[in-house]
Amino acid sequence: MKELQKIIKNKALDTFFQPILKLDSGETIGYEALNRPAVTNQFPNTEMFYEFVGQSNQVFFFECFCRNISLKRYINRLRDTMHQRTSLLFINIHPHVLLDSNYHSGETLQLLSDLGIEPNQVVFELTEKSAVTDYPLFEKVLSNYRSQGFRIAIDDVGSGYNSLKTLIYLKPEFIKLDKSLIQNIDQNIEQQQLVKLIIEYAKLSSSEIIAEGIERIEDLAFIAEQGVHYGQGYALGKPHQEVKQGIIPQY
């Protein structure tokens, strides 16, 4: 806990930005902000760090801290181009934080105004691994954020048992397919069938799909052929501290 508080106090996180590309045109439409702590004895890797944060009583304060530094560093590192000025920024946020009465959306709006970012450029990325229990309440809360211009993405879809219920109730603008569904998809019939089902659902619900974890040309070629809208992964662009556009490799 002392190490976590020290990280927050000293802003001891590195922020990386990974590009998200439109697969049919190669356009970089946005970036996911990734905040990573330095390796320490207490936190030898990023996964252990975030697992600890999620089980602590510091989730709310840490999430607000990450939101603020992600937005500020994004603007500070932008190249002065019209394309990047209008890009989307995907910010990871724990679902329970949005339900916390202390989380005031007005503060986020004020920060965006100060930085010159429109709310419709910000996508709250909610991990599917964090269980939502009161769906009607959460749907109401998300409606409030949407009315202000924010959009919602459900991350890790396909990695847990809650996927379908989460999609049906929360109606996200973006569905992010977990890398476990994407990697080696050209070789796995079961993965192909599930992804095709989610693509059909997305068409009916007016959601757009982002395939995560694209590392192989074969995976990219398969999902592009199926009509997946967007992609993210090392084959398209690695996370960088600078804000860099991705590239669609030839396949």
Image: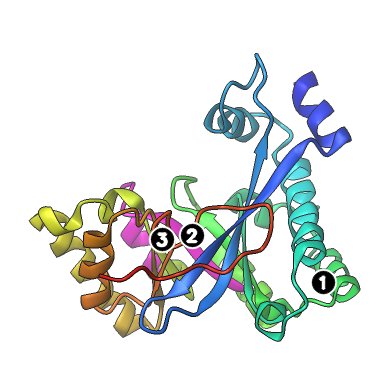
- The residue drawn where x is 82% and y is 60% is 72
Residue 193: within the magenta? no
Q: Does label 2 or label 1 sit earlier along the sequence?
A: 1
For residue 116, above or below residue 244: below
- The residue drawn where x is 29% and y is 48% is 180
Pointer 1: what residue?
Answer: 112
Task: Say which mark, if any, is on residue 141.
Answer: none
- Using the numbered discs, state the Cα–Cα distance from disc 2 to disc 1 in whole angstroms: 26 Å
The percent coordinates of residue 136 (x first, y second) are 51, 65
Pointer 2: what residue?
Answer: 237
The percent coordinates of residue 93 (x first, y second) are 62, 53
Instruction: State yes or no: discs 2 and 3 in contact (Cβ < 8 Å).
Output: no
Identified by mark 1, the residue type is Leu
Graded by Cα atoms within 10 Å as few (under 14), some (14 to 19) or many (20 or more), the crowding at tag 3 reads: some
User: Which quadrant is the N terminus positioned in?
Assistant: top right
Q: Secondary structure at mark 1?
A: helix
Which region of the structure is painted magenta? 151-168
Residue 158: within the magenta? yes
Q: Nearer the viewer, mark 3 or mark 1?
A: 1
Graded by Cα atoms within 10 Å as few (under 14), some (14 to 19) or many (20 or more), the crowding at tag 1 reads: some
- The residue drawn where x is 36% and y is 68% is 249
